[in-house]
Image (cartoon, helix red, strand yellow):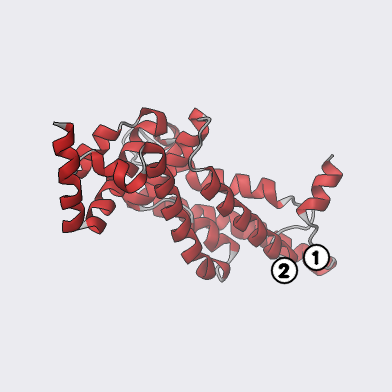
Amino acid sequence: MLRGMARRAPQERQRDPERSKARILSAAAAEFSAHGYAGARVGAIAARAGVNKQLISYYFGGKQGLYRAIAERWLEGQNAAAPAQAEMSLAELAASFIARGREEQELARLLVWEGLTQDAQDPGAAARSARMQTGTEDLLRRQAAGELPEELDVRYFQLIFMAAAIAPVALPHVVRSIFGPKTDSGSAEFTESYAKQLRLVIERLSGSAARAGKAARPRSRSLTARSTQDA
């Protein structure tokens, strides 16, 4: 039986391999989002995608490779968006990171799961770390331009920034407690209202930094120097 399944896999690949890969990745994102890396099952992913389970091993080398492929695809999307994001104001940038739509919210839940489970394998670590480093460098650039106060350590700001952006996905139960039991934190109405309020918060912070910059020329310290001082 298994040998017969393995023989059918190449035929399916020849018919439309890219479509099969896309379906597997979409199904995997949904399963990992719902159950985390440890809880997701390859069989459930294959069933959701409507493909033979053997294809997952063939295309991605198994569960870990599949998760890594999702992380890498996310990183590619982030890198593609980086030039446009660099032209945004800090407030616009903060609002842009709020997850809108099913796919973005699934990816945000993956980030939450990674933090909750602390899996030793952590297949998304490389992509996540690369993106965070890029974000840190962008904030240092913005600080040097006066968008952030000189005394602020941008690494902590980045963490606060990420927590704020992911809050509607990570804390839907808290959203319901604050706004009412029928509030859907993933709805377009709520996410747009939340984005507007987050923009206002960041605009106030940026405005304060700009006013402070008139009194003293802003300068940016390297993270290496800060780390030495912290030690």
Residue 214 position, x and y percent, is: 80, 69
Q: Earlier in the sequence, mark 2 or mark 1?
A: 2
Residue 216 screen position, x and y as percent: 85, 66
Residue position marked by numbered label 1 in the rendering: 218
In-front residue for pair 116/128: 128
- The image quadrant where one finds the N terminus is top left
Mark 1: secondary structure: loop
Disc 1 residue type (three-letter): Pro
The percent position of residue 34, horizontal first and vertical second, equals: 34, 34
User: Mark 2: which amino acid?
Assistant: Ala
Residue drawn at point x = 31 percent, y = 41 percent: 57
> Is 146 positioned to the left or the right of 84 in the image?
right
| In-front residue for pair 76/206 | 76
Q: Residue at the spot x=34%, y=44% of the render?
A: 29
Residue 180 picture quarter: top left
Q: Position of residue 96 (x, y in %)?
A: 48, 59
Q: Is 204 drawn above or below residue 181 in the view shown?
A: below
- Horizontal arrangement in the rendering, residue 220 relative to residue 15 (left or right): right
Count residues near mark 2 (Cα–Cα under 10 Å), then give few for <14, some for 14-19, many for 20+.
some
Are the residues tagged 2 and 1 within 8 Å (C-beta)?
yes
Q: Where residue 25 is drawn, which disc sits there?
A: none
- Residue drawn at point x = 18 percent, y = 32 percent: 2
Provide the secondary structure element on which disc 2 rests.
Answer: loop
Residue 119 seen anywhere in this rendered image of the structure: yes
Left or right, 204 with reference to 85: right
Q: Which residue is mark 2?
A: 145
